[in-house]
Image (cartoon, coloured by chain):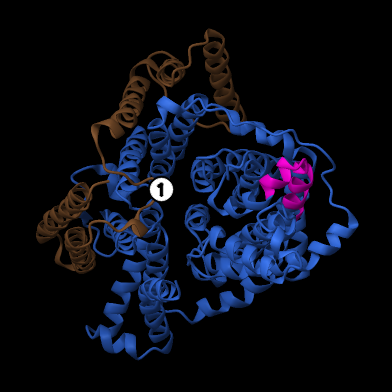
Chain colours: A blue, B brown
């Protein structure tokens, strides 16, 4: 980033409007994260249409703020009411809740807040310095590699999102199929439009995303109608939020180590915050002088998973922005947000769109700092959102979904698409499929097809020879095979070790 | 979850996807020849995977490791409430086209509160007024979003 770009970045970020956007993103993220049953994926899918009317920097800074704050928000309910708001906060509840029971809830919240802030910040710094050089790899890509990278991204998310690899990959292929709907860019003839003119421009991504993640969630929650009025018992939050200097010194190394683990795990496509938080928790226990107090309210057991799960956010954005391979299911949706704003992953993000991209990254850093400040000031109040009845949230989510789907093109057809995908999403989740690979297939489908067809033309009909004559293609094919077989191998290894 | 139920569910899911793949593959026969290669590869892959799901459901009926938290056997008891909510959403969208966004939103909110067993009148008033005001101020005024309209407001 040169001085000129840096000045432009500062000019975009140092405004009152941007401050409020980050503030809204952080508060919305903490609230959604604190509500068990609602996810960062849903929040981002719902907010993309709202950010559509904003300029790219403002909109995407808001989305990244929601992303990091929702991961942190999950820790508040994990610590105070033993109900992790997000799966990545499950490890936090192991020591966070016993601390609350012991009357140290405020200290646990403080430790979680500082750890989340530091973890997020370290990962944002890694994103700032690692993403630009890594994006140079994308310059070496031709059509064949673009096809393979799309397949690789899909294979990774398909094999790791959800429990069944076969179902995950099937969902991804269904997404690729949905991506073929519309007028073919090469010949101008329609495919799978069934005579519907609106479908000629392709399957609308945002309504599909909203339906899959939001409406399906409302339907899943409706199953619990008969036992929906369970109020969480809240322990009284007492004491000081800020840890003492001695405690800070004790957790320092753990904090840095866990942030590093989180950033690294985040960079591995498909591995999410839950994996990073458990690895960090185990490492913290391994290196701790007080191993026996883990699970009984050890502050180190709060610091490790919280630093790691927030560090995953910046880490997972690295492969997303540089190569277009989402590091997690949430970044797959975020990738859609980038592409809708005309920001395609790759080297161009750091050259042609450098001022926007760097502003988003530095805005993401600012969001982590603001999240820390807001968390330290009001975390114990945010937990009250966990008691908002779903009866009130359900109509709100439905209205947001409807307005969001309608707002983009002013088309009621898009609303029907959202409704239809809501039903598909529900049936998907009930039958063990994950909606994330389907959305990623829809996003990456056109890239894969363009790459495939251009490669077919360039190869003169001999695709295999063409693919095997390019070293990067060979490397990508090896990665695809590894991605396909690694879950099977890791299962075998873990069952052997058990 | 009984083995038989699980076999049925995954088998039917696989079979449905296989039928979909074959139907769409047949449909590609009418496509412009230059556009068919990629969709056919995708559909072929989908067909193979659907068959694999069917086979796996027969061979391995009780694999607890592969079950997600949301997953369950679809029965009337389980899908009853979600499908009522889905019906409400469909009626809500239809009603917007006729009676307008704000009236429909108010009615949908009232129904959803009643459906979710909220019985306090005060909650109804605050929720409906609060949601409508919030949506109007956020989308209509602040974000200047085009809201759907009907005969009424």
Question: In the rendered image, which quarter is residue A486 located in?
Answer: bottom left
Percent position of residue A141, x then y: 45, 79
Percent position of residue A206, x then y: 43, 45
State the residue lying farthest toward the top.
B121
Nearer-the-camera pick, A289 or A395: A289
Label 1 resides on the chain identified as B
Left or right: residue B104 compared with residue B10: right
Left or right: residue A33 compared with residue B153: right
Percent position of residue A254, x then y: 74, 66
Q: Which residue is mark 1?
A: B69
Percent position of residue A152, x then y: 40, 72
State the residue lying farthest toward the front.
A292
Is residue A226 in the magenta section?
no
Label tally: 1
Left or right: residue A343 compared with residue A250: left
Q: What residue is shown at x 52% (from left), y 54% (from top)?
A: A334
Asked whether the viewer can see residue A370, the reply is: no
Left or right: residue A160 compared with residue A64: left
Q: Report the quarter where the C terminus of chain A lies.
A: bottom left
Asked whether the viewer can see residue A174, the reply is: yes
Which contiguous range is marked in magenta? A96-114
Find numbered disc 1 in the image and state the secondary structure of the residue it sits on: loop
């Amino acid at each position: 980033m040169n001085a000129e770009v840096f000045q432009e970045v500062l000019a975009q970020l140092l405004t009152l409007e941007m401050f409020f956007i980050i503030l809204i993103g952080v508060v919305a993220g903490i609230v959604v994260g604190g509500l068990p049953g609602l996810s960062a994926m849903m929040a981002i899918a719902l907010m993309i249409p709202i950010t559509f009317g904003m300029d790219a920097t403002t909109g995407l800074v808001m989305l990244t703020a929601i992303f990091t704050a929702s991961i942190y928000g999950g820790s508040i309910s994990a610590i105070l009411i033993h109900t992790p708001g997000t799966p990545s906060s499950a490890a936090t509840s192991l020591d966070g809740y016993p601390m609350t029971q012991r009357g140290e809830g405020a200290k646990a919240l403080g430790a979680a807040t500082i750890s989340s802030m530091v973890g997020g910040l370290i990962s944002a710094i890694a994103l700032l310095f690692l993403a630009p050089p890594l994006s140079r790899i994308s310059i070496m890509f031709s059509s064949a590699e673009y096809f393979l990278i799309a397949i690789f991204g899909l294979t990774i998310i398909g094999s790791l999102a959800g429990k069944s690899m076969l179902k995950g990959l099937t969902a991804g292929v269904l997404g690729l199929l949905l991506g073929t709907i519309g007028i073919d860019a090469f010949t101008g003839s329609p495919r799978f439009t069934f005579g519907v003119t609106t479908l000629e421009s392709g399957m609308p991504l945002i309504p599909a995303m909203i339906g899959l993640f939001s409406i399906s969630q409302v339907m899943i929650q409706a199953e619990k109608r008969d036992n929906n009025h369970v109020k969480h018992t809240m322990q009284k939050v007492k004491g000081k939020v800020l840890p003492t200097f001695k405690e800070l010194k004790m957790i320092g190394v753990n904090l840095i180590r866990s942030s590093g683990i989180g950033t690294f795990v985040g960079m591995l496509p498909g591995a999410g915050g839950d994996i990073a938080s458990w690895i960090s928790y185990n490492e913290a226990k391994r290196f701790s002088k007080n191993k026996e107090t883990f699970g009984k309210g050890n502050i180190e057991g709060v610091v490790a998973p919280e630093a790691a799960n927030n560090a995953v956010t910046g880490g997972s954005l690295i492969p997303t922005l540089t190569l277009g391979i989402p590091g997690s299911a949430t970044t797959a949706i975020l990738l859609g947000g980038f592409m809708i704003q005309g920001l395609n992953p790759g080297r161009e993000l750091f050259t042609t769109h450098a001022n926007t991209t760097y502003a988003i990254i530095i805005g993401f850093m600012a969001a982590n700092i603001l999240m820390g400040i807001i968390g330290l000031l009001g975390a114990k109040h945010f937990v009250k959102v966990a008691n908002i009845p779903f009866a009130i949230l359900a109509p709100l989510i439905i209205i947001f979904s409807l307005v969001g789907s309608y707002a983009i093109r002013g088309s009621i057809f898009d609303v029907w698409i959202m409704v239809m995908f809501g039903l598909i999403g529900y049936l998907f989740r009930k039958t063990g499929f994950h909606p994330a690979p389907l959305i990623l297939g829809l996003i990456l489908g056109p890239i894969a097809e363009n790459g495939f067809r251009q490669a077919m033309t360039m190869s003169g009909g001999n695709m295999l020879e063409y693919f095997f004559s390019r070293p990067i293609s060979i490397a990508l094919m090896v990665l695809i095979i590894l991605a396909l077989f690694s879950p099977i191998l890791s299962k075998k290894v873990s069952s052997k070790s058990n | 979850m009984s083995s038989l139920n699980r076999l049925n569910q995954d088998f039917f899911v696989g079979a449905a996807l296989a039928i979909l793949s074959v139907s769409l593959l047949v449909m590609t026969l009418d496509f412009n020849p230059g556009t068919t290669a990629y969709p056919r590869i995708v559909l072929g892959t989908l067909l193979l995977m659907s068959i694999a799901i069917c086979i796996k459901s027969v061979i391995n009926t009780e694999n607890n490791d592969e079950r997600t938290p949301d997953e369950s056997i679809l029965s009337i008891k389980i899908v009853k409430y979600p499908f009522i909510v889905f019906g409400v959403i469909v009626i809500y969208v239809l009603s917007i086209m006729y009676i307008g966004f704000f009236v429909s939103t108010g009615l949908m909110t009232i129904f959803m509160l009643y459906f979710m067993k909220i019985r306090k009148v005060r909650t109804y008033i605050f929720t409906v007024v609060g949601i409508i005001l919030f949506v109007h101020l956020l989308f209509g005024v602040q974000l200047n979003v085009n809201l759907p309209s009907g005969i009424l407001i």
